[in-house]
Image (cartoon, rainbow, N blue to C red):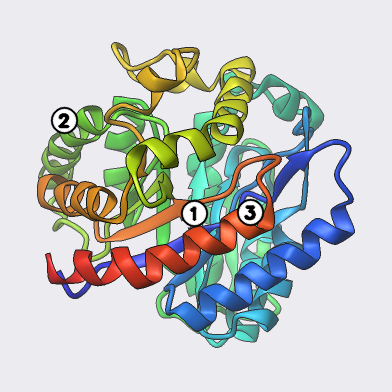
């Protein structure tokens, strides 16, 4: 499994009493460490109005990461595309692609939080239509000299980009999806399905089969790069790993539950309000180095997932713990997975 890539998800979400300048310095230290340890990518997500947490906005954050970690791909994973205007997203991703030497990944998903739809003057009802129109417009802006296109919330009339992306025909387009219909959509309109961190692994295995069938129906091959997000924590023993990560990981998933993330998940796997031990089971990659390596190898064998984007920090977790986990992954887990 020599071609397995490991990415670092930097959610950059912190408790509201934290000093964000200090947290920013720590995140840049993580970025430099990821570059040094041979990670493949750095990911940052997009949310607005993210109470109870503080966080950093995706575009300026990843643009700065590019300078700190010049060897890493920059995964805009994900952009809440239904909220956006296509020419804006196309322009800024193309700009970062040029500035980084062709390292941008364009992750996109619908979004699910009412506070965000209201703030951008749109609705959940319009989100699929807007998402598909925006994606089509962005692809066209990246590949055509001028674009004429009328959407439900924009009109491109002889529109063109100030700069085109380096990657041809365009940066990879990863479509985030939880529910079965969204996975079928990802097969149809994206370069790959970007597997979410929330669903249980048995759900992911079932949905990978659904994804394969949907690709077959579109006459598309299974993607060479198949990415997934997972919550990952490693320590000397499973007991120690569970004890150390629980206070921070549990807090994050309580917030997801309050935000209504479970409503976007498939039937039978749609309760993030479970007791922590039940929540972790068959969902997160937590344990000793051998156990976590084994879990990663199993995930690859059952699904073909080969770019694993790992969240190793949750709100309130100290920097020293994050650094320890990153080092232990690099030294004791990645080599085992690559041999496996």
Discs 1/3, front: 1
Q: Is residue 325 visible?
A: yes
- Earlier along the polypeptide chain: callout 2 or callout 1? 1
Residue 31 sits above or below residue 233 on the image: below
Numbered label attached to residue 206: 2
Labels 2 & 1 near each other (Cβ < 8 A): no
Q: Which residue lies under the disc numbered 1?
A: 107
Residues at badges 1 and 3 in contact (C-beta under 8 Å)?
no
**Residue 43 spot, x, y in % from top left:** 54, 59
Local packing at callout 2 (Cα closer than 10 Å; few below 14, some 14-19, many 20+) is few
Q: Nearer the viewer, residue 268 or 2?
A: 2
The secondary structure type at the circle numbered 1 is strand
User: Is 234 or 167 nearer to us in this picture?
Assistant: 234
Residue 133: give x, y in percent of width and height: 52, 44
User: Residues under labels 2 and 1: Cα distance?
Assistant: 22 Å
Looking at the image, which residue is at 59% across and 20% down?
A: 254
Which of the two discs, 2 and 1, sits closer to the camera? 2
As displayed, is residue 74 above or below residue 17? below
Q: Where is the N terminus found, in terms of image quarters? A: bottom left
Residue on which disc 3 sits: 86
Q: Residue at 48% across / 58% down in the picture?
A: 325
């Amino acid at each position: 499994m020599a071609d397995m890539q490991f990415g670092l998800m930097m959610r950059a979400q912190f408790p509201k009493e934290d000093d964000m300048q200090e947290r920013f310095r720590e995140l840049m230290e993580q970025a430099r460490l990821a570059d040094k340890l041979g990670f493949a990518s750095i990911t940052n997500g997009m949310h607005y109005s993210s109470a109870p947490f503080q966080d950093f906005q995706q575009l300026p954050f990843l643009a700065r990461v590019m300078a700190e970690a010049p060897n890493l791909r920059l995964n805009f994973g994900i952009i809440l595309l239904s909220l956006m205007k296509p020419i804006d997203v196309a322009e800024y991703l193309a700009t970062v692609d040029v500035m980084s030497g062709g390292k941008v990944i364009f992750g996109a998903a619908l979004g699910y939080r009412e506070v965000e739809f209201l703030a951008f003057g749109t609705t959940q009802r319009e989100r699929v239509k807007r998402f598909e129109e925006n994606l089509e417009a962005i692809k066209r802006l990246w590949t055509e000299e001028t674009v004429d296109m009328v959407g439900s919330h924009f009109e491109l009339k002889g529109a063109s980009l100030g700069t085109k992306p380096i990657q041809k025909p365009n940066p990879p387009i990863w479509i985030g999806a939880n529910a079965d219909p969204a996975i079928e959509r990802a097969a149809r309109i994206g370069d790959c399905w970007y597997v979410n961190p929330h669903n249980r692994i048995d759900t992911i295995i079932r949905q990978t089969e659904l994804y394969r069938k949907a690709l077959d129906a579109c006459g598309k091959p299974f993607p060479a790069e198949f990415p997934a997000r997972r919550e990952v924590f490693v320590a000397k023993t499973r007991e120690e790993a569970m004890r150390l990560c629980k206070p921070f990981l549990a807090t994050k998933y309580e917030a997801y539950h309050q935000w209504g993330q479970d409503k976007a998940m498939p039937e039978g796997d749609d309760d993030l309000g479970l007791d922590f031990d039940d929540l972790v089971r068959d969902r997160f990659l937590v344990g000793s180095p051998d156990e976590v390596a084994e879990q990663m190898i199993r995930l690859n064998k059952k699904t073909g997932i080969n770019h694993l984007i790992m969240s190793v920090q949750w709100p309130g977790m100290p920097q020293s713990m994050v650094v320890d986990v990153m080092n232990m992954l690099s030294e004791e887990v990645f080599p085992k997975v690559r041999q496996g």
